[in-house]
Amino acid sequence: MSVLAAPPYASTRVTTEWSPRGWAIYLGWIAIVLDGSALNLALPTIARQLDVPTGEMSWVVDAYTLPLASLLLLGGSLGDRVGAEKLFRIGAVGFAAASVACALSPSLGLLIASRCAQGVCAALLLPMVLALVGKSFTDPQHRSGAVNLLTLFGGAAMAAGPLFGGLLTDSIGWRGVFWLTAPIAIAGAWLVGSAGSPEATQVKQRVDVAGQIAGTTGLVALVSGLIETGNGTASPLAWVLLGAGLGLLATFVSLERRSDAPMMPLQVFRSPGFSAAVAGGFAFQFGAYGLQFFLAVHLQTAWGVSASAGGLLLASFAIGTVLASVVVNPHLMRSGTRSMILVGTAVAATGMLALLGATGVERAWLLVSAEFIIGVGTGIYSTALNKTASTALGAKDAGLASGIYNTARQVGQSVGIAVLGALAGARGIREAFPVAIVLVICCTAGIAAVELFRRPTAQR
C-alpha cells in the first residue's frame, strides 16, 4: 500500500517501532478492533435491558460500520489537507468521547446516535493509523517491524475482544464494553505527537461532495431497508428504503463516471484482479464477520449461555486467524495468492459445514473446533485478498486501491449484519441458524469461484 511507502521527507530523528509514536498507532488500531470484536457479546443483554426486539440490534452494529464504510475515502483525503497527525488526534479523541456517550446512553435511539458518531470518528482515525506508519518510520526495517506489530496487536485485540466483552457484560454490565475502548483511544491521541515528526505539505484536491452524499445516503437507505425487513414481513417503509438505496447507488455510479475528481474512479475496476479482490473483500466481511455477529446472539438466545461463556466459545475464531497469519501463511505465500485463496476458502467452508452440527450446548466442543477451522481458513484467504488488492493496480494507485478495498470490506460487514439480523428477526434465531450458515458458505464458495474462473494475469 502506498501509505506504507517511504514519505517524501525525512525526519531528523529516526522513529522505531517501539517508540511512543509507534505505540500511539498501535493503540488507535487496538481501539477500533476491540470495539468491533467485544460488542457482539453484549447485544442480547442490551436488547433485554433496553426492551427492544433482537432484530433491531443490527442497528447498534451497523450505525457504526455504515459511516465508517461510507467515509473512509473522505477521511483519507482529509488527512492530506489537515495533516495525518492532527486528524489522528481528532479521530481518536472523538472516538473516545463517542464511546463515553454510548456507555451513558439511556435508550436505543441515543445509543444508535452515539454509535454513529463513533463510526464517523473511526473513519477519520483508521486511514490515519495506516498513513502514520508510512509517515513515521523512515527506516525500512523499522517500518516492517511496525507493520508486523500492527498485525500482531490487531490479532490479539480480535482474540481478546469476545473474552473482554463477555466478562464485562456479565460483571459490570454492557456499558463496560464502551468504557473499555475510551482510555485506549485517549492514550493514542496523547502519544501521537511525541516524536515530533513534521507533516508533509500536500496538494489540496477537490472533494467529490456529490458522490460522497449519493454513496453515503444510498448505503444507509439500502442497509436500513434490509434491517427493517427483520421485523417480519417487508413493510412499505422497507421497500421504499430498498428502492431509494438502489436508486441512490445507481446515481453514485453515474456521478463517478462523469466526475473530473471522483472519490472512486470507476476505471480501476477494469483490472480483473482488483475487481475480484474487491468482490472477495465484500464477501469475506459479509460472511466471516456477519457470522460472528449472528453466533454471538445465537449462543445467548438459543443456547442460553452467559455472555462470558459465549466469548470463550467464539474466541477460537480469532485464535485460528492469528495462527494462520503467523504460522501457515509464510509457507503458503510461496505458492501465490491464487492457491492461498482456494486453500483458505476450502478450509473455511469445511469449518462452516461442521458448524451445522453444533445444534446445542452439548456440542459446544464442535462449535469451538469449527470456529477455529473457519478462523484458519479466513486468515489464509483474507491475507491473499489483501495482497491482491494492494498490488493489482501497481504502486502508483496502491493507496486508492487500499481505500476502495477497505470500503468494500466495511460495506460487506454492514450488509452481512443487516441481512443475517433480518433473517434472525423474520424466522427466529434458532430456525435461522442453518439458513445463515448456508448463506455464509455461499459467500465463501463465491470467492473461490471468482478466483477459479478468472484468468491469472501474472504470478502474484
Image (spheres, rainbow, N blue to C red):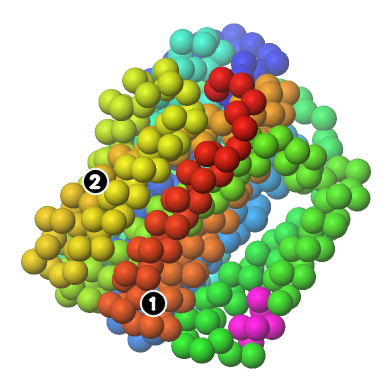
Mark 1 and mark 2 residues within 8 Å of each other at the beta carbon? no
Residue shown at the point (82%, 45%) measured from the top left: 262
Cα–Cα gap, marks 1 and 2: 24 Å
Q: Residue at x 46, y 10 (%)?
A: 141
Front position in the image: 386 or 110 = 386
The magenta span reads 237-242
Examine the structure image and report whether residue 6 is included in the region drawn in magenta: no
| Residue pointed to by mark 2 | 372
Q: Residue at x 49, y 28 (%)?
A: 337
Q: SS of the residue at dot 1?
A: helix
- Where disc 2 sits, the SS reads helix
Which is nearer the eye, 79 or 314? 314
| 168 left or right of 24 in image | left
Does residue 298 show up?
A: yes
Q: Residue 267 at what x, y percent from top left?
A: 80, 40
Q: Residue 424, which numbered label?
A: 1
Q: Would you say 444 lies left or right of 300 here? A: right
Q: Earlier in the sequence, mark 1 or mark 2?
A: 2
